[in-house]
Amino acid sequence: MMLMSLPMYAVSPADVEAFAGVLRQKLRQLGLASTPDRLNWPQDLFSHWQAPDLLLSQTCGFPLMESLPQVQLVGTFSYHAPGCDGFRYRSFLLAREEDAGLHLAGFRHRRLAFNSTDSQSGYNSLRALVAPLAKDGTFFSRATATGSHRESLHYVQQNLADLAAIDCVTLELLRRSEPRSLSGLAVIGQTAAVPGLPLITSPETSAEDLAILRQALHDIVDEPISHPLLIEGFTEVPRQAYRVISQMKALAQAFGVSELMPALQKTT
């Protein structure tokens, strides 16, 4: 059996498991006999995404362009959430309500919380946004990797950071299921929209099986099981559509911003 995971929007793992169960049935009905019996929840996502027996997973657009040239792109979901535009999504900038009147420039020399440096929504998109505002390659006084969007929000709530860029789909899922995680916070801006989180498969997946995957994904978006995950469409997006993500990185570098962690912080 091959591997299947949907790790990126697992605010409610039970909803993800239920969705995967229906997807599994559709894949088997369409003749994909190698459909796995269970969903994987890998600890090492990067190794999982490179597995030769990967049938389906969801990654982020930044690692797709930077680190996963060999995987096949299946497509991407569209989500019913503020900030989404068809198959494109963006991040919202969250700060404490006391800073709600500030624009992004007002957060110069303030503290950032981000999920990880390989995140388009939490890091790369914001890096491109602050780069024109940076001085000597620096904008924030401190940047802390928290490991997740949920934890970045917690950092801002607890005054351990002042700003975080949060994936708009994650934000809407949290608003519906964990509203306390947004208590005391306000949106002060947004990033540019890019194609949504890519669904990928192994380079060894056959053209026939890839076609079955796409058909099942087209079919499942019309099922009620998709609604709790905010899924409302599926698009077979070409890899070249994600070049905008690499362009964001290049834009920031052109302004001298290769990373958001201040040089002083890196030496401490």
Image: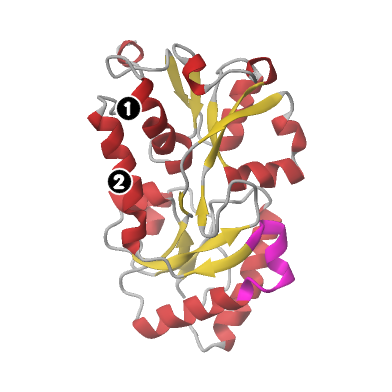
Where in the figure is residue 258, as x and y percent of width and height?
A: 28, 28
The residue sitting at 54% across, 62% down in the picture is 77
- In the image, 99 versus 46, the foreground residue is 99
| Residue 50 horizontal/vertical position (percent) | 34, 59
**CA separation in Å, label 1 and label 2:** 14 Å
Which residue corresponds to the image point at 59% horizontal and 87% vertical from the top-left?
A: 29
Residue ID for mark 1: 259
Splitting the image into 4 quarters, where does residue 240 fall? bottom left
Instruction: Identify the element where label 2 is drawn.
Output: helix
Residue that carries the numbered disc 2 in the rendered image: 246
* Range drawn in magenta: 220-231
The three-letter code of the residue at mark 1 reads Glu
Assess whether residue 223 is covered by the magenta stretch: yes
* Residue 156 placement: quadrant: top right
Query: Which numbered marker is on residue 182?
Result: none
Task: Name the kind of residue labelled 2 in the image.
Answer: Ser
Residue 67 visible at all: no
What residue appears at the point 35 percent right and 68 percent down from the top-left corner? Answer: 202
Q: Is residue 230 left or right of residue 61?
A: right
Element carrying mark 1: loop
Quadrant of the frame with the C terminus: top left
Q: Earlier in the sequence, mark 1 or mark 2?
A: 2
Depth check, front residue: 266 or 39: 266
